[in-house]
Structures are given as C-alpha cells and as structure tokens.
Amino acid sequence: MAEQQSGLDEAVQVGTSAVSHIRSLRTFSLFAKSAKGAAVAGPLGAALGLAIANQHTILKILAALLAIPILAVFLFLCFPV
C-alpha cells in the first residue's frame, strides 16, 4: 500500500521546493551580475560587480571582523592594574 501524504507534509514539501528555487534564482542573479562585469571590464570588473551587488553582505562581514579586535581591547581594559 502506497504511503499517503498528509496536507502538512505536502505543504512542507512545496515550501522546501519554493525556497530551493528562490535560492537558485539568487545565485543565478549573482553570477549574472558577475558575468556582466566580466564582459565589460574583465576580471577586475567582475570582482567590482560582485562587490557592488553584495555591498550589504560585505559590510556585515567587515563589521564582524572589526568587532573581534575591539572586543579583545575591551577585555584587556577590564583587567585590574
């Protein structure tokens, strides 16, 4: 006897499929912008195009990388003299 899916199982499967398609579209648009930059100015244009397209993500990464040394300085200043 074949297993029957409940309505919830089917909804989860449809949602998972939709998320997968959205992620693939985002990845495709990322590579499309990179290819557009590469066509205009070569590898440097591709890198610049990716940086411009993902500037919010790059800023978040830079903020996290700068927070690590700042936290280390704060911890050092907390030590008694």
Image (spheres, grey):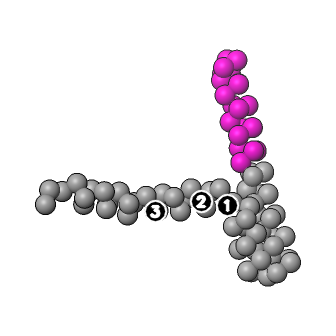
Tell me the distance, in whole angstroms, between the alpha carbons under discs 1 and 2.
6 Å
Residue 22 lies in magenta, yes or no?
yes
The quadrant in which the N terminus is found is: top right
Give the image location of residue 65, x and y in percent. 47, 62
- Of the pair 71 and 81, the residue shown nearer to us: 81
Disc ID at residue 55 = 1
Which residue has dot 3 on it? 66
- Does residue 80 appear to the left or right of 3 in the view shown? left
> With respect to residue 50, does 9 lie above or below?
above
Residue at horizontal 69 percent and vertical 60 percent from the top = 54
Q: Amino acid at mark 2?
A: Leu
Residue at horizontal 75 percent and vertical 52 percent from the top = 26
Q: Image quadrant of residue 13?
A: top right
Residue stretch in magenta? 2-23
Q: Amino acid at mark 1?
A: Gln
- Does residue 73 appear to the left or right of 53 in the view shown? left
- Does residue 57 appear to the left or right of 15 in the view shown? left
Which residue has dot 2 on it? 59
Q: Are marks 1 and 2 in contact (CB under 8 Å)?
A: yes
Does residue 1 appear in this view?
Answer: no
Q: Image quadrant of residue 71?
A: bottom left
Tell me the distance, in whole angstroms, between the alpha carbons under discs 2 and 3.
10 Å
